């Protein structure tokens, strides 16, 4: 804590409560978490869109053996 003899340039001009309010601006308290959640959901949707869809191969690409029907779905 600064004493009564502290130079003027070391004395805070704004209360900490005002600084917190200025840093937050108009955004709600959960804005950062909301942005993180939205970024994660975007990544999940992008990854899901790149997954193969439809019927799979009937033969193994490595050895050529037939893949059982129950393993293809």
Image (cartoon, rainbow, N blue to C red):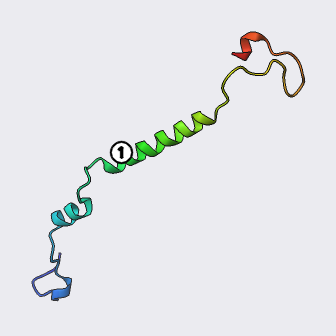
Instruction: Report the residue at 15% width, 73% height from top.
Output: 14
Q: Is residue 24 left or right of residue 48?
A: left
| Residue placed most toward the observer, 57 or 71 | 57
**Position of 37 relative to 48 (above/below):** below
Q: Position of residue 57 (x, y in %)?
A: 78, 21
| View extreme (left): residue | 4
Instruction: Report the residue at 90% width, 22% height from top.
Output: 64
Which quadrant is the C terminus positioned in? top right
Residue 53: which quarter of the image?
Answer: top right
Crowding at label 1, few (<14), some or many (≥20) Cα neighbours within 10 Å? few
**Position of 18 relative to 9 (above/below):** above
**Position of 45 relative to 10 (above/below):** above
Which quadrant is the N terminus positioned in? bottom left
Residue 13: which quarter of the image?
Answer: bottom left
Q: Which residue in the structure is indicated by mark 1?
A: 34
Instruction: Report the residue at 16% width, 65% height from top.
Output: 18
Instruction: Report the residue at 17% width, 77% height from top.
Output: 12
| Residue placed most toward the observer, 53 or 63 | 53
Q: Secondary structure at mark 1?
A: helix
Q: Position of residue 4 (x, y in %)?
A: 9, 83
Residue 70: which quarter of the image?
Answer: top right
| View extreme (front): residue | 54
Q: Position of residue 15 (x, y in %)?
A: 14, 69
**Position of 23 relative to 35 (above/below):** below
Q: Position of residue 47 (x, y in %)?
A: 59, 38
């Amino acid at each position: 804590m600064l004493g009564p003899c502290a130079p003027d340039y070391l004395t805070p001009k704004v209360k900490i409560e005002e600084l917190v309010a200025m840093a937050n601006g108009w955004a709600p308290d959960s804005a950062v978490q909301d942005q993180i959640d939205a970024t994660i959901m975007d990544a999940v949707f992008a990854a899901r869109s790149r997954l193969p869809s439809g019927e799979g191969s009937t033969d193994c690409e490595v050895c050529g053996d037939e893949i059982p029907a129950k393993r293809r779905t």
